[in-house]
Image (cartoon, rainbow, N blue to C red):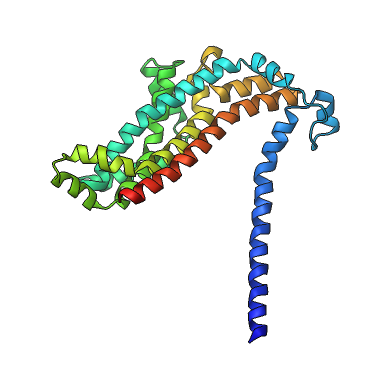
Amino acid sequence: MQDLRTKSRIRKWIGTGLIYLLMAIFLVITVYPIIWMLAGALKGENEFYSNIWGLPSSPQWGNYVAAWKKAGMGTKYLNSILTTAGTLCLLIPVNCCAAYALARVNFKGKRSILNYLLLGIMMPAGVLAMPVFTVVNELGLINTRIGLTLVYAAQAIAFGMYIMRGFFISLPKSLEEAAMIDGCTRFQSFTHVILPLAVPGLVTQVIFSGLSVWNEYIRASLIIRTPDLQTLPLGMVAFSTLENNNYPQMFAALSMATLPMVLVYLLCQKAFQKGITAGAVKG
Protein backbone atom coordinates (compact mmCIF):
# COMPACT_ATOMS: atom_id res chain seq x y z
CA MET A 1 0.00 0.00 0.00
CA GLN A 2 2.82 2.31 0.91
CA ASP A 3 4.53 1.52 -2.40
CA LEU A 4 1.40 2.44 -4.33
CA ARG A 5 1.17 5.78 -2.54
CA THR A 6 4.86 6.49 -3.21
CA LYS A 7 4.46 5.64 -6.89
CA SER A 8 1.35 7.87 -7.09
CA ARG A 9 3.24 10.78 -5.55
CA ILE A 10 6.20 10.26 -7.90
CA ARG A 11 3.86 10.25 -10.91
CA LYS A 12 2.19 13.41 -9.62
CA TRP A 13 5.56 15.12 -9.15
CA ILE A 14 6.69 14.06 -12.62
CA GLY A 15 3.45 15.33 -14.16
CA THR A 16 3.71 18.64 -12.31
CA GLY A 17 7.36 18.96 -13.32
CA LEU A 18 6.53 18.37 -16.99
CA ILE A 19 3.78 20.99 -16.84
CA TYR A 20 6.15 23.56 -15.31
CA LEU A 21 8.81 22.67 -17.88
CA LEU A 22 6.34 23.22 -20.72
CA MET A 23 5.23 26.53 -19.20
CA ALA A 24 8.87 27.64 -18.87
CA ILE A 25 9.54 26.77 -22.53
CA PHE A 26 6.51 28.74 -23.70
CA LEU A 27 7.51 31.65 -21.43
CA VAL A 28 10.97 31.78 -23.01
CA ILE A 29 9.52 31.54 -26.52
CA THR A 30 7.10 34.40 -25.74
CA VAL A 31 9.32 36.73 -23.72
CA TYR A 32 12.73 36.30 -25.36
CA PRO A 33 11.86 38.14 -28.63
CA ILE A 34 10.80 41.15 -26.54
CA ILE A 35 14.02 41.00 -24.49
CA TRP A 36 16.04 40.65 -27.72
CA MET A 37 14.32 43.73 -29.18
CA LEU A 38 14.91 45.81 -26.04
CA ALA A 39 18.55 44.66 -25.81
CA GLY A 40 19.14 45.32 -29.52
CA ALA A 41 17.77 48.85 -29.13
CA LEU A 42 20.57 49.63 -26.65
CA LYS A 43 23.48 48.43 -28.79
CA GLY A 44 25.68 50.32 -31.19
CA GLU A 45 25.67 49.31 -34.85
CA ASN A 46 28.98 47.44 -34.61
CA GLU A 47 28.05 45.65 -31.39
CA PHE A 48 24.69 44.64 -32.81
CA TYR A 49 26.35 42.50 -35.48
CA SER A 50 29.20 41.21 -33.30
CA ASN A 51 26.97 40.39 -30.30
CA ILE A 52 23.56 39.87 -31.90
CA TRP A 53 22.03 37.55 -29.25
CA GLY A 54 23.64 38.91 -26.07
CA LEU A 55 22.97 41.86 -23.80
CA PRO A 56 24.55 45.26 -24.59
CA SER A 57 27.95 45.87 -23.01
CA SER A 58 27.39 49.65 -22.91
CA PRO A 59 23.75 50.81 -23.31
CA GLN A 60 23.28 53.38 -26.08
CA TRP A 61 20.24 55.35 -24.94
CA GLY A 62 20.81 57.79 -27.77
CA ASN A 63 19.20 55.27 -30.14
CA TYR A 64 15.81 56.12 -28.67
CA VAL A 65 16.35 59.86 -29.09
CA ALA A 66 17.56 59.44 -32.67
CA ALA A 67 14.69 57.10 -33.57
CA TRP A 68 12.12 59.46 -32.03
CA LYS A 69 13.38 62.39 -34.10
CA LYS A 70 14.02 60.58 -37.39
CA ALA A 71 10.74 58.66 -37.38
CA GLY A 72 8.66 61.63 -36.22
CA MET A 73 7.29 59.47 -33.42
CA GLY A 74 5.51 62.34 -31.67
CA THR A 75 3.11 62.95 -34.57
CA LYS A 76 2.64 59.23 -35.20
CA TYR A 77 1.83 58.67 -31.53
CA LEU A 78 -0.76 61.43 -31.54
CA ASN A 79 -2.41 60.07 -34.69
CA SER A 80 -2.55 56.52 -33.30
CA ILE A 81 -3.92 57.69 -29.94
CA LEU A 82 -6.62 59.85 -31.55
CA THR A 83 -7.61 57.10 -33.99
CA THR A 84 -7.71 54.35 -31.35
CA ALA A 85 -9.56 56.48 -28.79
CA GLY A 86 -12.05 57.69 -31.40
CA THR A 87 -12.71 54.14 -32.58
CA LEU A 88 -13.35 52.89 -29.04
CA CYS A 89 -15.57 55.87 -28.22
CA LEU A 90 -17.78 55.02 -31.21
CA LEU A 91 -17.54 51.26 -30.89
CA ILE A 92 -18.28 50.61 -27.22
CA PRO A 93 -21.62 52.50 -26.87
CA VAL A 94 -22.93 51.09 -30.16
CA ASN A 95 -21.89 47.53 -29.33
CA CYS A 96 -23.22 47.65 -25.78
CA CYS A 97 -26.68 48.86 -26.81
CA ALA A 98 -26.97 46.62 -29.88
CA ALA A 99 -25.59 43.53 -28.11
CA TYR A 100 -28.02 44.05 -25.22
CA ALA A 101 -30.93 44.16 -27.66
CA LEU A 102 -29.72 40.98 -29.37
CA ALA A 103 -29.26 39.24 -26.03
CA ARG A 104 -32.45 40.28 -24.26
CA VAL A 105 -35.08 41.34 -26.83
CA ASN A 106 -36.91 38.92 -29.13
CA PHE A 107 -37.79 40.41 -32.51
CA LYS A 108 -38.22 39.32 -36.10
CA GLY A 109 -34.95 38.96 -38.04
CA LYS A 110 -32.79 38.54 -34.95
CA ARG A 111 -31.22 35.31 -36.22
CA SER A 112 -30.49 36.90 -39.61
CA ILE A 113 -28.68 39.80 -37.92
CA LEU A 114 -26.55 37.38 -35.89
CA ASN A 115 -25.65 35.42 -39.03
CA TYR A 116 -24.76 38.66 -40.81
CA LEU A 117 -22.48 39.68 -37.94
CA LEU A 118 -20.86 36.25 -37.99
CA LEU A 119 -20.19 36.73 -41.70
CA GLY A 120 -18.52 40.05 -40.85
CA ILE A 121 -16.15 38.26 -38.46
CA MET A 122 -15.26 35.58 -41.02
CA MET A 123 -14.56 38.00 -43.89
CA PRO A 124 -10.80 38.66 -44.33
CA ALA A 125 -9.73 42.31 -44.14
CA GLY A 126 -7.86 42.11 -47.45
CA VAL A 127 -11.02 41.11 -49.34
CA LEU A 128 -12.80 44.24 -48.12
CA ALA A 129 -9.91 46.61 -48.75
CA MET A 130 -10.94 47.91 -52.17
CA PRO A 131 -14.70 48.17 -51.44
CA VAL A 132 -13.88 50.10 -48.26
CA PHE A 133 -11.51 52.39 -50.17
CA THR A 134 -14.19 53.05 -52.80
CA VAL A 135 -16.80 53.98 -50.19
CA VAL A 136 -14.41 56.22 -48.24
CA ASN A 137 -13.33 57.91 -51.47
CA GLU A 138 -16.96 58.55 -52.50
CA LEU A 139 -17.63 60.12 -49.10
CA GLY A 140 -14.62 62.42 -49.47
CA LEU A 141 -12.91 61.02 -46.37
CA ILE A 142 -9.61 59.93 -47.94
CA ASN A 143 -6.58 61.17 -45.99
CA THR A 144 -8.58 62.11 -42.88
CA ARG A 145 -8.53 60.80 -39.32
CA ILE A 146 -12.33 60.74 -39.31
CA GLY A 147 -12.42 58.44 -42.33
CA LEU A 148 -9.91 56.04 -40.80
CA THR A 149 -11.73 56.06 -37.43
CA LEU A 150 -15.12 55.35 -39.01
CA VAL A 151 -13.67 52.44 -41.00
CA TYR A 152 -12.03 50.92 -37.94
CA ALA A 153 -15.18 51.29 -35.83
CA ALA A 154 -17.43 49.81 -38.54
CA GLN A 155 -15.22 46.77 -39.10
CA ALA A 156 -14.79 46.07 -35.37
CA ILE A 157 -18.52 46.08 -34.60
CA ALA A 158 -19.17 42.42 -35.50
CA PHE A 159 -16.52 40.93 -33.21
CA GLY A 160 -17.27 43.32 -30.34
CA MET A 161 -20.99 42.62 -30.66
CA TYR A 162 -20.46 38.90 -30.16
CA ILE A 163 -18.23 39.50 -27.13
CA MET A 164 -20.77 41.77 -25.40
CA ARG A 165 -23.75 39.60 -26.33
CA GLY A 166 -22.07 36.61 -24.69
CA PHE A 167 -21.55 38.55 -21.46
CA PHE A 168 -25.12 39.88 -21.41
CA ILE A 169 -26.57 36.40 -21.97
CA SER A 170 -24.49 35.04 -19.07
CA LEU A 171 -26.06 37.54 -16.63
CA PRO A 172 -29.31 36.41 -14.94
CA LYS A 173 -32.50 38.17 -16.02
CA SER A 174 -33.64 38.31 -12.41
CA LEU A 175 -31.25 41.24 -11.81
CA GLU A 176 -33.07 43.40 -14.36
CA GLU A 177 -36.47 42.25 -13.16
CA ALA A 178 -35.59 43.20 -9.59
CA ALA A 179 -34.40 46.65 -10.73
CA MET A 180 -37.60 47.24 -12.74
CA ILE A 181 -39.74 46.16 -9.77
CA ASP A 182 -37.92 48.84 -7.76
CA GLY A 183 -38.97 51.45 -10.32
CA CYS A 184 -36.19 51.44 -12.93
CA THR A 185 -36.94 51.58 -16.63
CA ARG A 186 -35.32 49.01 -18.90
CA PHE A 187 -32.69 51.55 -19.94
CA GLN A 188 -31.94 52.44 -16.31
CA SER A 189 -31.60 48.77 -15.38
CA PHE A 190 -29.25 48.39 -18.35
CA THR A 191 -27.01 51.33 -17.39
CA HIS A 192 -27.10 50.89 -13.59
CA VAL A 193 -27.18 47.11 -13.20
CA ILE A 194 -26.10 45.28 -16.35
CA LEU A 195 -23.25 47.47 -17.59
CA PRO A 196 -21.33 47.46 -14.26
CA LEU A 197 -21.50 43.66 -14.26
CA ALA A 198 -20.30 43.54 -17.87
CA VAL A 199 -16.98 45.24 -17.11
CA PRO A 200 -14.99 42.10 -18.08
CA GLY A 201 -16.66 42.19 -21.51
CA LEU A 202 -15.94 45.89 -21.93
CA VAL A 203 -12.30 45.39 -20.96
CA THR A 204 -11.97 42.42 -23.33
CA GLN A 205 -13.38 44.56 -26.13
CA VAL A 206 -10.99 47.41 -25.33
CA ILE A 207 -8.01 45.04 -25.38
CA PHE A 208 -8.86 43.25 -28.63
CA SER A 209 -10.24 46.21 -30.57
CA GLY A 210 -7.63 48.64 -29.23
CA LEU A 211 -4.75 46.33 -30.13
CA SER A 212 -6.25 45.70 -33.56
CA VAL A 213 -6.56 49.42 -34.35
CA TRP A 214 -3.17 50.31 -32.87
CA ASN A 215 -1.38 47.69 -35.00
CA GLU A 216 -3.47 47.93 -38.19
CA TYR A 217 -1.61 48.69 -41.42
CA ILE A 218 -3.58 47.66 -44.55
CA ARG A 219 -6.57 50.00 -44.25
CA ALA A 220 -4.42 52.84 -42.94
CA SER A 221 -2.11 52.54 -45.95
CA LEU A 222 -5.12 52.83 -48.29
CA ILE A 223 -6.77 55.82 -46.61
CA ILE A 224 -3.85 57.91 -45.29
CA ARG A 225 -1.70 59.72 -47.83
CA THR A 226 0.40 62.35 -46.03
CA PRO A 227 3.14 61.81 -43.38
CA ASP A 228 1.51 64.20 -40.91
CA LEU A 229 -1.52 61.86 -40.60
CA GLN A 230 0.38 58.55 -40.52
CA THR A 231 -0.25 56.19 -37.61
CA LEU A 232 2.56 54.24 -35.93
CA PRO A 233 2.41 51.16 -38.23
CA LEU A 234 2.73 53.40 -41.31
CA GLY A 235 5.50 55.38 -39.62
CA MET A 236 7.41 52.20 -38.71
CA VAL A 237 7.33 51.00 -42.33
CA ALA A 238 8.53 54.38 -43.59
CA PHE A 239 11.28 54.48 -40.95
CA SER A 240 12.43 50.93 -41.74
CA THR A 241 12.78 51.96 -45.39
CA LEU A 242 14.77 55.04 -44.37
CA GLU A 243 17.02 53.21 -41.86
CA ASN A 244 17.13 49.75 -43.40
CA ASN A 245 20.59 48.98 -42.00
CA ASN A 246 20.42 50.68 -38.61
CA TYR A 247 18.76 47.91 -36.64
CA PRO A 248 19.38 49.36 -33.15
CA GLN A 249 17.42 52.51 -34.03
CA MET A 250 14.71 50.43 -35.72
CA PHE A 251 14.41 48.29 -32.59
CA ALA A 252 14.25 51.45 -30.47
CA ALA A 253 11.36 52.76 -32.58
CA LEU A 254 9.56 49.41 -32.35
CA SER A 255 10.02 49.37 -28.56
CA MET A 256 8.47 52.82 -28.25
CA ALA A 257 5.57 51.82 -30.50
CA THR A 258 4.93 48.63 -28.49
CA LEU A 259 5.23 50.02 -24.96
CA PRO A 260 1.82 51.84 -24.78
CA MET A 261 -0.14 48.70 -25.68
CA VAL A 262 1.80 46.67 -23.10
CA LEU A 263 0.91 49.24 -20.44
CA VAL A 264 -2.74 49.33 -21.54
CA TYR A 265 -2.89 45.54 -21.39
CA LEU A 266 -1.50 45.50 -17.85
CA LEU A 267 -3.98 48.16 -16.73
CA CYS A 268 -6.89 46.35 -18.40
CA GLN A 269 -5.84 43.09 -16.79
CA LYS A 270 -6.30 44.66 -13.35
CA ALA A 271 -9.64 46.10 -14.40
CA PHE A 272 -10.67 42.67 -15.69
CA GLN A 273 -10.00 41.11 -12.28
CA LYS A 274 -11.84 43.92 -10.49
CA GLY A 275 -14.79 43.50 -12.84
CA ILE A 276 -15.08 39.79 -12.07
CA THR A 277 -14.95 40.49 -8.33
CA ALA A 278 -17.52 43.29 -8.54
CA GLY A 279 -19.87 41.13 -10.59
CA ALA A 280 -19.63 38.28 -8.11
CA VAL A 281 -20.47 40.57 -5.18
CA LYS A 282 -23.37 42.32 -6.89
CA GLY A 283 -24.75 39.08 -8.27
Which of the 4 image quarters holds residue 93? top left
Q: Would you place residue 235 above or below residue 8 in this image?
A: above
Give the image location of residue 110, x and y in percent: 24, 46
In the image, is 235 to the left or to the right of 241? left
Front residue of 85/58: it is 58
Q: What is the tally of numbered marks visible in this picture?
A: 0
Q: Residue at x 51, y 29 (%)?
A: 214
The quadrant holding residue 94 is top left
Pick whichever, 237 or 85, lies toward us. 85
**Foreground residue among 178 and 237:** 178
Is 97 left or right of 14, judged from the image as shown?
left
Residue 62 appears in view: yes
Asked where in the image residue 116 lies, by quadrant, the reply is top left
Residue 31, position as x, y percentages in the image: 66, 42
* Res 124 visible: no
Residue at 35% from the left image edge and 28% from the top image edge: 90
The residue positioned 27% from the left and 53% from the top of the image is: 172
Q: Quadrant of the N terminus?
A: bottom right
- Which residue is located at x 65 percent, y 48 percent? 27
Q: Name the spot of residue 244 as percent of width and height, x first.
A: 73, 23
